[in-house]
Image (cartoon, helix red, strand yellow):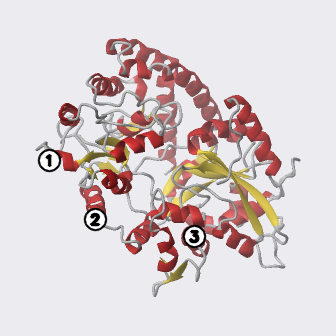
Amino acid sequence: MTKAWVKGVSVSMSIIIVATAIAGCSGTGGKEAAPAAPGTNTAGADSGKISAKEREITIAFPEHPNQPVKNMAPIQQEILKQTNIKLKFETVPNSNYNDKKKILIATNNLPDIIQVDMADINSFASTGVFVPLMQYMNKGLMPNFKKVWDQYPDMAKLTADGDLYGFPAIGRNELKNGFGPVIRTDLLKKHNLPTPKNFDELLTVLAELKKIYPDSTPFSARKGSGPIHQLFKTMSYMLGSGVGSGNGIYFDKDVNGGQYVYGQGTPEFKNVLAYLNKAFTMGVLDKDYAVATQQQWTEKLTSGKSFFFMDNSGFALDYTKQLQKAVPDGKLELIPIPEYKPGKARAEFYATTITNDRIFAISSKAKDPETLVKLIDWMYTEKASNLMNYGVEGVHHTLDEKGQPKLNSDYVMKFKDGQPTAFYAMYSDLGSGKLSFTPWFSNSEPQVQVEKLTGNWSDMHEQFWKTIANDKAYHDPYLEPPLTKEEAARVKEILVNLNTMLEQEYDKFIMGVKKLDEYDAVMKKARDSGGAELEKIYNGALARLNQKK
């Protein structure tokens, strides 16, 4: 597992150490290098490889607890063999990544490549910390990515002030999934309780389970990351409001025919707080919801202490397997999205093609950025995608009669008892998949192959995907429109103030420290302090984009 940060020091000090450590590992040797002019051929034309000489580049991205990262995994070794470029991963625990990433960007102390999101692009592209990419695409130096660009018109939404500042991770034949309600269906059956059809029924059912199991925590949650709690990210939209990707602004197709709304500045968000407050005061919602780590959350669900969660519903499949070690008949199963009002149920799929929260930007201080551009462009080829998702051909996978990669059973079976799952253990060993540095990722197809090869595929898996496919509440996510440099700067300024103001308020209302009626004043202040202006900026940007079509 790679670690770029020192434990046991203060957060601020550790961030400074990180910035220095990562910058020191970059290909610049600690010195600024002027970017090569577009079209200048600095790659390995004679060797047939992307770089003529072996070169090490550093890449920062978050390390998910399910998939520990190790340097020079088989895929990195093969990339070095094929391109002459050694990838050195500088990872940060997922829960700390956003804060530390922002320090690196703000101080322009970046590794060669860093994973960012569209909010980072909007906030920092104008400062010159990222290499603008349109110049390379216009010179014909990004032919593989250009095919993707031309295929998906929505890619234009990933630009800032007319330029592209990072390579988005693109999904490859991904199964659609999203945040969803998961409940102990074995307990519903055992105690003759109905599957909740709406959110009020959900609380009633959980309250009944609390009566039957007084020492339980029926509804558990994890803290997540960022200024907006995971509960809001997973539940607000389903409850009739929303917080978008975590900055509060989101597109609501049910408002005036479809427009951007600042969620926390609306009465609908007050309803979300009211619902969570009711769950908390009933003793249904975990009293530690605001601080629970993913590990603590997992332990409650897999030990039989908790019966419901609203989060990545895919966790249900593995958590059931773990639960059954303690409760042989236990089943955590996805149910259809409950209605938030009569006849109204809604939920968003995760981005399965274009992502705006997983973008790989090149540092403007990186030595010879053209070579890095060519490297990432190569990663959008089918050959590279096969390698970066299935491992080395002939070792970890073979191609079937249709030319599609199939994992080798002998290799996969090494991870039959892997933790937390066989497929995450394999991804970690290979250095593959969406949670790694993989611009064209395939997560669900290899996952299904692993589950079937290890004998873990079951009727529950079939039912899980059937439930999602049949639930009409889900829709594809909406990509935010591109902002101008001035708009992005203003959005950043507004959000700093709003997040600082609101972050300290949410839990007071959920826990009952403040009465819900007091949120009216908070809501008005939020709108007056920039919430209304955010709506104006985003709706104006959307109208501008639509005029260009």
- Estimate the x, y position of residue 543 in percent, counting from the top left: 47, 40
Depicted 373 relative to depicted 303: above or below:
below
- Kindly identify the amino acid type of the residue bearing the numbered disc 3: Ser
For disc 2, the marked residue is 462
- Kindly identify the amino acid type of the residue bearing the numbered disc 1: Lys
**Distance from the alpha carbon under mark 1 to that under mark 3:** 46 Å
- Estimate the x, y position of residue 484 in percent, counting from the top left: 61, 38
- Decide if residue 295 is on the left or right side of residue 188: right
Question: Is residue 408 visible in this depiction of the protein?
Answer: no
SS under mark 1: helix
- Kindly identify the amino acid type of the residue bearing the numbered disc 2: Glu
Question: Is residue 116 visible in this depiction of the protein?
Answer: yes
- Decide if residue 156 is on the left or right side of residue 101: left
SS under mark 2: helix
**Distance from the alpha carbon under mark 1 to that under mark 2:** 23 Å
**Label of residue 385 in the image:** 3
Q: Earlier in the sequence, mark 1 or mark 3?
A: 1
Nearer to us in this view, 462 or 45: 462
SS under mark 3: helix
Q: Nearer the viewer, mark 1 or mark 2?
A: 1
Rendering quarter of residue 282: top left
Farthest-out residue, bottom: 401
For disc 1, the marked residue is 190
Depicted 193 relative to depicted 175: above or below:
above
- Estimate the x, y position of residue 520 in percent, counting from the top left: 37, 14
Q: Earlier in the sequence, mark 3 or mark 2?
A: 3
